[in-house]
């Protein structure tokens, strides 16, 4: 794997080259915009975060939608990212962004390779959260995403989104300059 993070133009080129639709690309750009705003808030609170990773990861998080719009887009995206020789840090964002994380039990049900699909790093969590707060290209409160997941009987995913929302909110409130 390369350690070189793609810049914004390179990330968009990777999405286009792999067949992502314009709708997916503008969604990824909207997620990146929100993720960068969140990153700035964390930076002003003196958190050490990799802004370039957040931008590239947010732009590429839905790379797998070039192949499918099912939950499996995380796995498809991971495989495309590996074929593109993208850094492991990007691959982790792609495979861990779905549903605010996928548990080992859920991954087994989906027949995914045994791996960790729960966001671990602050960068992974910021991209994942930003994705949950963007519907198409519109910003929505996390609470709307939570209600939508509950309506779809995806209560575990709804709980994970709520937990992620609370975690990031608390980090911003608790951390002193």
Image (cartoon, helix red, strand yellow):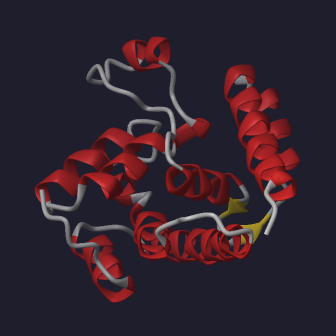
**Residue at the spot 39% in from the left edge and 28% down from the top edge:** 116
Q: Residue 55, position in %: x, y?
A: 47, 73
Considering only vertical position in the picture, is 132 above or below 59?
above
Considering only vertical position in the picture, is 64 above or below 158?
below
Q: Quadrant of residue 11?
A: bottom left
Q: Nearer the viewer, residue 67 or 33?
A: 33
**Residue at the spot 38% in from the left edge and 13% down from the top edge:** 108
Q: Left or right? Give the position of 65 relative to 174.
A: left
Q: Residue 61, position in %: x, y?
A: 44, 58
Q: Left or right? Give the position of 28 relative to 64.
A: right
Q: Left or right? Give the position of 81 relative to 155.
A: left
**Residue at the spot 54% in from the left edge and 34% down from the top edge:** 101
Looking at this view, name the residue that lies furthest to the bottom: 9
Q: Left or right? Give the position of 25 relative to 149.
A: left
Considering only vertical position in the picture, is 52 above or below 149?
below
Q: Quadrant of residue 20?
A: bottom left
**Residue at the spot 62% in from the left edge and 68% down from the top edge:** 35
- Quarter of the figure that contains the C terminus: bottom right
Q: Residue 30, position in %: x, y?
A: 61, 75
Q: Residue 159, position in %: x, y?
A: 76, 27
């Amino acid at each position: 794997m390369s350690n070189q993070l793609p810049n914004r133009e390179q990330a968009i080129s990777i999405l286009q080259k792999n067949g992502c639709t314009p709708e997916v690309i503008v969604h990824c750009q909207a997620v990146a915009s929100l993720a960068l705003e969140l990153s700035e808030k964390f930076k002003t609170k003196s958190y050490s975060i990799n802004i370039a990773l957040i931008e590239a990861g947010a732009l590429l998080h839905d790379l797998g939608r070039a192949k499918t719009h099912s939950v499996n887009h995380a796995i498809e995206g991971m495989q495309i990212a590996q074929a593109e020789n993208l850094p492991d840090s990007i691959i982790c964002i792609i495979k861990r962004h779905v549903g605010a994380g996928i548990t080992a039990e859920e991954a087994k049900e989906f027949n995914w390779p045994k791996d960790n699909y729960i966001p671990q790093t602050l960068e992974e969590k910021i991209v994942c959260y930003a994705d949950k707060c963007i519907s198409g290209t519109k910003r929505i409160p996390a609470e709307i995403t939570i209600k939508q997941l509950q309506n779809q009987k995806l209560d575990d995913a709804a709980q994970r989104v709520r937990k992620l929302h609370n975690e990031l909110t608390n980090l911003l409130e608790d951390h002193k300059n």
